[in-house]
Amino acid sequence: MSDATPATDRPRLDLRGQRAHGDQAFRYLAIGAAALVLLVLGLIAITMTQRAIPVLRTMGLDFFTSTTWSEHDERFGALPFIWGTIYTATIAVVLSVPVSLGVALFITQVAPSWLKKPLIYLVDLLAVVPSVVFGLWGVLMLAPHLGRSFLSAGIILAIMITPIITSLAREVIETTAQADKEAAFALGATRWEMIRAAVFPHARSGLVGAVMLGLGRAMGETIAAALVIGSSAQIALSPLSSGDSMPAVIANQWAEAGATQKSALIALAVTLFVMTIIVNLIASAIVRRSMIRSRGVGG
Amino acid sequence: MSLGGELTRAFDLRPKRSWRGVKSNLMTVLMAAAVGLIAIPLVLVMVSVFSKGGAILFHDFPSFLTADIPPVRKAGPGMGPAVIGTLIITGTATLIAVPLGVLGAIFLNEYGGASKFARLVRFMAMVMTGVPSIVMGLFIYVVWTMHFHLQAFGGALALACLMLPIVINASEQMLRLVPNSLREASFALGATKARTVLTVVLPAAGSGIVSGSLLAVARAAGETAPLLFTIGAARTINTALFTDENTALSARIFENAKEAVVNAQDRGWGAALALVLLAFSLTVIARVVTAYATKVRK
């Protein structure tokens, strides 16, 4: 930077010296902190897979297809938990999407400007409540009416992912071009027709991405599901029957688990990790594509 | 709309009450109903937490927040160890995650820019945000707790891992808002890059980073799953970071919710109120910081 300093003045005015060392040190510090993200993710994948391998080796593919989960027989089949995870997350998304979309549309298209901020705060407030508090409420107030079941878990999960989907949907919808909306109105469209003609086509892929992110969050949510799902390793179709999900079974069985079962629970966590990452990657790919299309540049 | 009465009648081109208009109004009503619908669980949960939790928390105030945890069946107060544990664990996690997260964001915005490595880190931080908290807890169990023992620090490590990507993301967005002219002015005065970042860029983005970090802390304070494998279950106050088991409000709420004993459930409600108040006040402080900063900037 200071290469332009006249040579004769160098001894007196060269201020680089130690400062340059400090400057470099700070740069490496920053690089190190950023690399920490890669380190943690890499370590998660490596160390946990290592712990899971003994069980995965003895069970083979049966780990994913067997329905028996018994420490006594050392047989660990995760299918009921995989089913419960997907089932409850799907219930949560189905319940949450219409509501989230309605709230997002109301905030962006209907609400007068003075009402927007309070409504956004209301949605954020829902996100601030810790999941364990929803779990406590679910098990003591909701479960007495609905039983400990897939449906109870799905409802609690739906409450928890609604703020996420709503705020993402709101951001996507807000990028709709004003000109498109006015064009629709000018052609005589009602508000709903304008939304269908201008907002939805523009926001569709972004909305799908928001829903996928909500799905990923619902799959990984532990505590609320652990309390209200009922803890029974069965594959049932009825939303009112009890079941179990992967994070819930890890949380509920850990304390009493022996060494082999701990390994099986870690294998379950690895499976969950892979499933949520796949869902999140698809979601981010969809969102990114929609951003590129709507702005013409990489988001 | 507000034309004179006769004119309106003469030129009224608005469609007659048609199905299209009705449908549009119906959808608007449904959207408003959705807003009402999300308010319902919030109100129900808050009413339960404040009435049931308030009854026990303020019945024995402040000893509920300081007394030891009694045996499950016994009635009466005591969440002191959990209050102290939550403060120690979340505080330590903050001390680890915020400096590292801000440094990471500094790299992304000030050094990395659009380089391949920076793009990779940004992408991986996004992936890391999606890692379920229970997986993060088991990860810390495998790399830390198994080699040492149950202690507050293990829980703090797990929470720090969860906070890190959130802090990085929030801080980078704030750094991006700092105008380049500030950096150029600092360079023109002969400051090095590190000095520019530390004394010019960071203070300019400071309030945004503080409020983003506070929101991350509020979320971390409510996390339960990562603590199940890392901190144990103390019943007496333990202020040590590295020795002996500890406990936390969230973990206590989870355990008490599983009990069939009303006395234990009541303590769960009390702990829930304490945790909700902590999370809400952190959020409010974050908002105040943001509001104050925007006012100053204007």
Image (spheres, coloured by chain):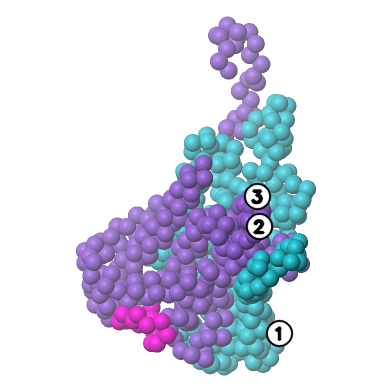
Considering depth in this image, is A103 or B66 the residue closer to the camera?
B66
Q: Is residue B239 magenta?
A: yes
Q: Is residue A102 left or right of residue B52?
A: right
Q: Is residue B74 left or right of residue B205?
A: left
Circle 1: element type: loop
**Magenta span:** B234-247
Pointer 3 residue: B181
What percent of the width, then of the height, locates residue A290?
74, 51
CA gap, disc 3 to disc 1? 59 Å
Q: Is residue B168 magenta?
A: no
* Chain letter of the residue beneath label 1 in the structure image: A
Q: Residue at x 39, y 74 (%)?
A: B88
Circle 2: element type: helix
Pointer 2 residue: B187
The disc placed on residue B233 is none
* Chain letter of the residue beneath label 2 in the structure image: B
Snapshot quadrant of residue B152: bottom left
Question: As shown in the figure, which amino acid type bears the numbered disc 3?
Answer: Ser
